[in-house]
Image (cartoon, rainbow, N blue to C red):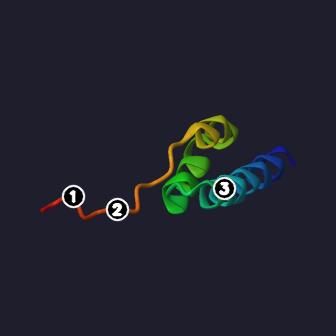
């Protein structure tokens, strides 16, 4: 029964990290994978993540 609770917690962390990253402009797939790997410990890090830069025209 405990393994089911851990799987559900991990799935919640994946979805939550993806959602937060998407709202903040960070990389959602990267943060979803971090949520899968380190679980609830990824949530504070995604909250501190810097947004992804959208200006890639620096290569003149």
Residue 48 location, quadrant = top right
Indicate the position of residue 53 as horizontal and vertical percent values. 40, 56
Q: In whole angstroms, how far apart are the C-alphas of marks 3 and 2? A: 28 Å
Q: Are marks 3 and 2 in contact (CB under 8 Å)?
A: no
Marking on residue 27: none
- Helix, strand or loop at mark 2: loop
- Helix, strand or loop at mark 3: helix
Q: Which residue is mark 2?
A: 55
**Which one is in front, 11 or 28?**
28
- Residue plotted at (51% across, 62% down): 29
Indicate the position of residue 40 as horizontal and vertical percent values. 70, 39
**Which one is in front, 34 or 55?**
55
Q: Which residue is mark 1?
A: 58
Indicate the position of residue 6 as horizontal and vertical percent values. 76, 46
Q: Are marks 2 and 1 in contact (CB under 8 Å)?
A: yes
**Image check: 38 left or right of 4?**
left
Q: In whole angstroms, how far apart are the C-alphas of marks 1 and 3? A: 33 Å
Image label count: 3
**Image check: 52 left or right of 24?**
left
**Image check: 55 left or right of 36?**
left
- Residue plotted at (49% across, 58% down): 27
| Mark 3 burial class by Cα count in 10 Å: few <14, some 14-19, many 20+ | many
Sequence order check: which comes first, mark 3 or mark 2? 3
Sequence order check: which comes first, mark 1 or mark 3? 3
Q: In whole angstroms, how far apart are the C-alphas of marks 2 and 1? A: 7 Å
- Single out the mark in the foreground, 1 or 3: 1
Indicate the position of residue 42 as horizontal and vertical percent values. 61, 40
Query: Which residue is the extreme one toward the left?
Result: 60
- Residue plotted at (61% across, 61% down): 22
**Which one is in front, 24 or 14?**
24
Q: Which residue is mark 3?
A: 14
């Amino acid at each position: 029964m405990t393994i089911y609770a851990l799987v559900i917690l991990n799935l919640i962390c994946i979805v939550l990290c993806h959602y937060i990253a998407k709202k903040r402009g960070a990389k959602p797939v990267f943060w979803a994978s971090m949520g899968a790997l380190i679980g609830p410990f990824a949530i504070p890090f995604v909250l501190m993540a810097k947004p992804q830069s959208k200006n890639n025209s620096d290569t003149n």
